[in-house]
Amino acid sequence: MSPLLTGLLLAVVASVALNASYLMQHAGSSGAPEMDVRRPVATLTGLLRSRWWLAGAVLGVVGSLGHAAALYGAPLSLVQAFAAGGLVLTVPVAARVFGQRLGRREAWAVAALVVSLATLGIGATSTAARGVPVGPLVVALTAAALVAAVLVVLADHRRRAVALGTAGGILYGAGDAATKALAVVAHHGVLGVVASPWLLVYVAICGCGFACFQRGLQLGPVVPVVVTMTAATNAVAILTGIVAFGEPLGATPLLATLHAVAFAVAGWAGLRLVARGNDLHADAPAAGSVRVPDALGVTGPH
């Protein structure tokens, strides 16, 4: 099996694991103490006390390792396009387990988002990066961090959960770009990864993304938070792959046009979901009152 095909298969498997982990973390974090970046140890301890959150976190680590392995053998933009498929499972599972459903227009927006991101994989080829483009990558990561900060600061109360999910996704997308840089370094020896400054960049960016996303999950509801987070992750990672790593938008003018349209559709769908905010599920349980559903095989508070 070619490294490209192996990477794409790993991307799909990792996506399913990650999206399942998000739902489990939502089930566990809703009853945990409020996320507070000023008290990281106490916050993490509170989350770890939830069996559902801990199980989701372990599954998320497995998915993240699979995603990193996928980036070792396939282009960043192509891996992210295939990873979008996990959203297809997230929405119906959340509807079944948590009773959280999207309206018809929002469901169409999610469908458009998945299809448009998957379209970005059409006609893509493996283009192994020979080095890390330090300058363009630093600019891209800095821009992503600034946009995420603006979202966190300016979001109003009604849209805060989705804004935090989106900010977390932007930072996770930047983290995927840093992971790709580490994957490039890994081709020259594993020890170089440990000594690479990109490892520190990855930890810092994903730490901030983790705080944003987990707080978004606490405020809930889970579907719009996970959808906008995943969309932002994929969009930022794909754009960084194109802009910083020089991955082609399309091998031909026709494919480049198709992919540009797909980006536009994905942007429209993501903005629609962000604009709707928590109105998508006005009847969802409030943060801190969610009970682990009987569908998960557990009754009572978690």
Image: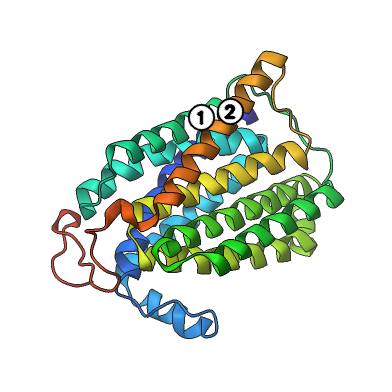
For the residues carrying marks 1 and 2, which lies nearer the camera in this image?
Answer: 1
**Residue linked to disc 1:** 116
> Is 9 rendered above or below residue 43?
above
- The residue that appears at 80% across and 57% down in the rendered structure is 192
| Quarter of the view holding residue 102 | top left
Residues at marks 1 and 2 touching, judged by CB atoms closer than 8 Å: yes
Numbered mark located on residue 7 in the image: none
**Residue linked to disc 2:** 120
Quadrant of the rendering where the C terminus is positioned: bottom left
Does residue 18 appear in the picture of this structure? no
- The residue that appears at 74% across and 54% down in the rendered structure is 190
Q: Residues within 10 Å of mark 2 (few under 14, many from 20)?
A: many
Q: Secondary structure at mark 2?
A: loop
Tell me how far mark 1 sits from mark 2, CA to CA. 7 Å
> Is 134 rendered above or below residue 242?
below
Residue 3 as seen in the image, left or right of residue 292: right
Image location (x, y in percent) of residue 298: 16, 63
Residue 62 as seen in the image, left or right of residue 1: left
Q: Amino acid at mark 1?
A: Ser
> Is 172 rendered above or below residue 270?
below
Residue 211 as seen in the image, left or right of residue 282: right
Image location (x, y in percent) of residue 189: 78, 50
- The residue that appears at 28% across and 36% down in the rendered structure is 104
> Is 142 rendered above or below residue 123?
below
Taking depth in this image into account, of 130 and 103 the one nearest to the observer is 103
Q: Amino acid at mark 2?
A: Leu
- The residue that appears at 58% across and 55% down in the rendered structure is 172
